[in-house]
Amino acid sequence: MRDPARVEQFAGELDGWTVSPSGGQRALHDQYREFLKGEPSSLSREREQGHFTASALMVDPLRASVLLVMHPRVKRWLQMGGHIEPGDMSFRDAALRECIEESGYREIEVESTPARFDRHDVPCKSARGEVVQCVHWDVQFLAVVDSQSQCILTEDAPTRWWDLESAMPELDYSVKQLIDTARQAFRL
């Protein structure tokens, strides 16, 4: 995936990020831009040393709840997300595709710009099918969905709506930060 036009398109999406800098997000954003420009292959999981992923926290603002998936390899509740695929034309497209695949919902509105960035080590299935330790450069979005709308599951990883006013499961710091971002964005 060394298509310069595609890299420019993804870079343009990062340039559209407008959230005010806080908690190291501005520095992380700048590192993402440098990584994408310096490693065009970083849009593919074939780059085992580290590559981009896209995810979205699915929020039902009417019910003040979020949808999380029990990640089968990591064994933790996470937002929907995964690798950039060849047909994805933007981080947002990848996040939307992952939301549809993992949640079963079809009527999802992914925000136009990233909400956060999170870089983390994770066991990752390589293009060869092996599980390797890798760095995911995750571009995180917020997505709005009506939890009462039609849902047709195509994957078997468990998902669950969590009411933000009730007890939540133990969550990674990154997921907590994304939920806090959603609370501020949607005034939940």
Image: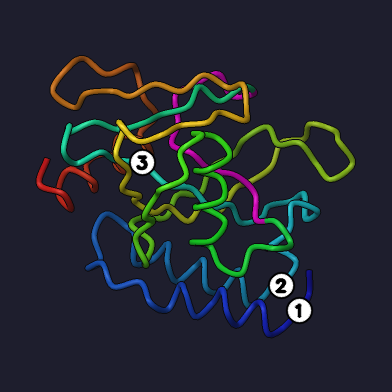
Residues in magenta?
A: 73-84
Q: Earlier in the sequence, mark 1 or mark 2?
A: 1
When the figure is inspected, residue 10 is found, relative to residue 135, above or below; the finding is below
The front one of 18 and 108 is 108
Query: Contact (CB < 8 A) between labels 1 and 2?
Result: yes
The numbered mark at residue 132 is none
Measure the C-alpha gap from mark 1 to mark 3.
30 Å
Q: Which residue is mark 2?
A: 40
Under mark 2, the amino acid is: Pro
Q: Which-is-in-front pick, marks 1 and 2? A: 1
Q: Which residue is mark 3?
A: 58
The secondary element bearing badge 2 is classed as helix
Under mark 1, the amino acid is: Asp
When the figure is inspected, residue 127 is found, relative to residue 77, above or below; the finding is below
Measure the C-alpha gap from mark 2 to mark 3.
29 Å
Q: Position of residue 84 (x, y in %)?
A: 65, 56
Q: Is residue 83 magenta?
A: yes
Q: Seen in the image, is 124 located left or right of residue 110? A: right
What residue is shown at x 33% (from left), y 16% (from top)? 169
The front one of 109 and 52 is 109
The number of numbered badges drawn on the structure is 3
Q: Position of residue 145 (x, y in %)?
A: 32, 43
Q: Which residue is mark 1?
A: 3
